[in-house]
Image (cartoon, helix red, strand yellow):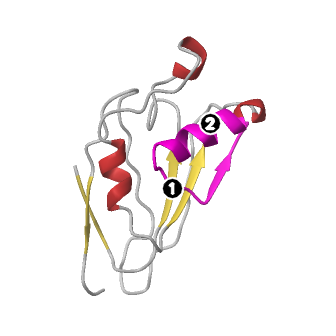
Amino acid sequence: MNLTLSSLPHTWILDLDGTLVEHNGYKIYGKDRLLPGVRDFFAQIPDEDYVLILTARKQDYKLLTEKFLDENGLRYDLILYNMPVGERIVINDDKPSGLKMGMSVNKARDEAVGIRIDILNAL
């Protein structure tokens, strides 16, 4: 899958379990397991972008979770714990130029992350 994005700074809102790491791996194996393609995906995210990770994990897993992400070179600006397990809804307005300001990607749980990011040179 390709995402073609403007050259503006972006906000990434990413789920953790089943999206970046194996769902409940930290409970089953006592540690997380990074899903295939995640490192390559993160390497494409521009440095000026903001990365927000959401998880239903309890705050008790904060140190374990952040240590794993740091050890695997996955940068983030904020992780929100104790999130509800239901749908995640994003509502945003489009730019007057017509630029769509909200995107969504749904993938199968524990599926490899195969997203290519293309940044346009100009708006």
**Side of 1 where 82 appears, left or right:** right
Q: Nearer the viewer, residue 114 or 95?
A: 114
Q: Nearer the viewer, residue 108 or 62?
A: 62
Residue 30 drawn at (x, y percent): 59, 17
Measured Cα–Cα span from mark 2 to mark 1:
12 Å
Q: Image quadrant of residue 106?
A: top left
**In the rendered image, the vertical position of residue 27 relative to residue 51, given as above or below:** above
**Side of 14 where 44 appears, left or right:** left
Q: Badge 2: how crowded within 10 Å, few (<14), some, or many (20+)?
A: some
The answer to whether residue 84 is visible is no
Indicate which disc residue 75 carries. 1
Element carrying mark 2: helix
Q: Residue furthest top?
A: 28
Residue 8 drawn at (x, y percent): 41, 80
Indicate which disc residue 2 carries. none
Q: Which residues are magenta?
A: 62-83
Residue kind at label 2, given as amino acid type = Thr
Residue at 24%, 84% (x, y): give it.
121
Residue 88 drawn at (x, y percent): 57, 44
Disc 2 target residue: 65
Residue at 35%, 36% (x, y): give it.
107
**In the rendered image, the vertical position of residue 2 relative to residue 110, given as above or below:** below
The answer to whether residue 51 is visible is yes
Image quadrant where one finds the C terminus: bottom left
Q: Image quadrant of residue 78?
A: bottom right
**In the rendered image, the vertical position of residue 86 relative to residue 77, given as above or below:** above
Q: Residue furthest front?
A: 71
Q: Residue furthest right?
A: 60
Q: Nearer the viewer, residue 15 or 86?
A: 15
In the rendered structure, does residue 28 fall within the stretch colored magenta?
A: no
